[in-house]
């Protein structure tokens, strides 16, 4: 299964890369024939490759690693509002009910496709889908839609997600973030906060801690994050980062603790990511 997830990740990278190489030629030819007023929109796709090295993998408040380094490579391609991302998680010492003795394991590969468009001045809309290829559970598929407002003092984003393949349910997420330019070598500081509300329709996957016959529904988790973006080259950025996840109430605390691999409801993590973009 590890080999399967690993091959899915690299197979997807190859397919996306080959497709975009073809698309780039087509886009370039098309752009050459457009009037100059179109130059405000990038004439070619942009690429971003990154690798994160973190002390813990936390997903919407649930800890999906336990006392181990996780390595998370990612590739994103964007063009005129369209974006495709492939992301993976490699746990250097996976320790859970599936592997209680611990071992290195590539346990997740995600593919995200999205389209964003400005609909009114500072307001943008995004729609898309996320396919989760999981090692320890059935694969899942989410579709989502959201609105983002670029306000003078921060950016606010509201997203609604619906699981349509397995583990049916709804997720509602609010994210607030702002980037502060710093006066040293084009360095910037990103600060963020967010809140998640979950309405599950699957009591087997997300049981209510007070009644396991019913699925969890209610406020779930919140987070605070900070990241320092340090350009070390025209195309390379190094980013130390920190995050803190916490439950939104006692019920949420019991739910998160019950499903987290470390059996805790609050999680603090840190690490470093390196990105290459052009």
Image (spheres, rainbow, N blue to C red):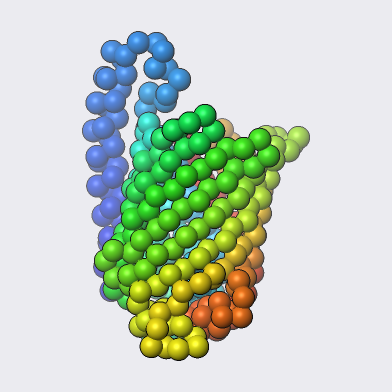
Q: Please tell me whether residue 61 is drawn above or below residue 8 in the rendered image.
A: below
Q: Quarter-wise, where is residue 39 in the image?
A: top left
Q: Position of residue 128 (x, y in %)?
A: 35, 49
Residue 68 at least partly seen: yes
Farthest-out residue, right: 183
Q: Position of residue 176 (x, y in %)?
A: 60, 50
Q: Camera-side residue: 46 or 114?
A: 114
In the picture, measured across the screen, residue 39 lies left or right of residue 267, that is: left
- Count of numbered marks: 0
Q: Position of residue 238 (x, y in %)?
A: 60, 47
Q: Position of residue 132 (x, y in %)?
A: 33, 63
Q: Quarter-wise, where is residue 3 in the image?
A: bottom left
Taking the spot 31% from the left edge, 50% from the top edge, the residue there is 13
Residue 269 at least partly seen: no
User: Which quadrant of the rendered structure holds the N terminus?
Assistant: bottom left
Q: Quarter-wise, where is residue 250 in the image?
A: bottom right
Q: Please tell me whether residue 88 is drawn above or below residue 180 in the rendered image.
A: below
Taking the spot 66% from the left edge, 54% from the top edge, the residue there is 226
Q: Camera-side residue: 192 or 159?
A: 159
Q: Camera-side residue: 218 or 33?
A: 218
Taking the spot 46% from the left edge, 74% from the top edge, the residue there is 217
Q: Camera-side residue: 268 or 246?
A: 246
Taking the spot 57% from the left edge, 61% from the top edge, the residue there is 195
In the picture, measured across the screen, residue 225 lies left or right of residue 103, that is: right
């Amino acid at each position: 299964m590890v080999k399967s997830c690993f091959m899915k990740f690299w197979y997807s990278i190859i397919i996306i890369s080959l497709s975009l190489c073809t698309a780039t030629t087509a886009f370039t030819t098309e752009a050459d024939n457009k009037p100059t007023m179109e130059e405000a929109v990038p004439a070619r796709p942009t690429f971003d490759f990154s690798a994160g090295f973190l002390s813990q993998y936390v997903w919407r408040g649930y800890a999906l690693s336990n006392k181990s380094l996780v390595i998370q490579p990612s590739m994103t391609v964007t063009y005129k509002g369209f974006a495709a991302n492939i992301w993976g998680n490699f746990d250097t010492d996976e320790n859970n009910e599936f592997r209680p003795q611990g071992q290195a394991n590539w346990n997740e590969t995600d593919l995200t496709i999205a389209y964003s468009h400005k609909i009114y001045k500072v307001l943008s809309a995004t729609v898309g889908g996320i396919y989760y290829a999981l090692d320890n559970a059935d694969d899942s598929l989410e579709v989502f839609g959201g609105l983002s407002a670029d306000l003078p003092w921060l950016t606010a984003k509201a997203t609604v997600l619906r699981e349509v393949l397995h583990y049916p349910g709804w997720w509602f997420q609010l994210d607030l973030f702002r980037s502060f330019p710093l006066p040293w070598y084009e360095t910037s500081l990103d600060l963020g906060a967010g809140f998640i509300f979950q309405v599950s329709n699957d009591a087997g996957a997300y049981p209510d801690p007070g009644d396991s016959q019913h699925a969890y529904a209610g406020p779930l988790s919140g987070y605070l994050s900070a990241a320092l973006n340090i350009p070390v080259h025209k195309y390379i950025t190094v980013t130390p980062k920190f995050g803190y996840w916490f439950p939104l109430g006692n019920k949420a605390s019991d739910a998160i603790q019950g499903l987290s691999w470390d059996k805790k409801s609050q999680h603090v993590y840190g690490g470093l990511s390196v990105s290459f973009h052009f």
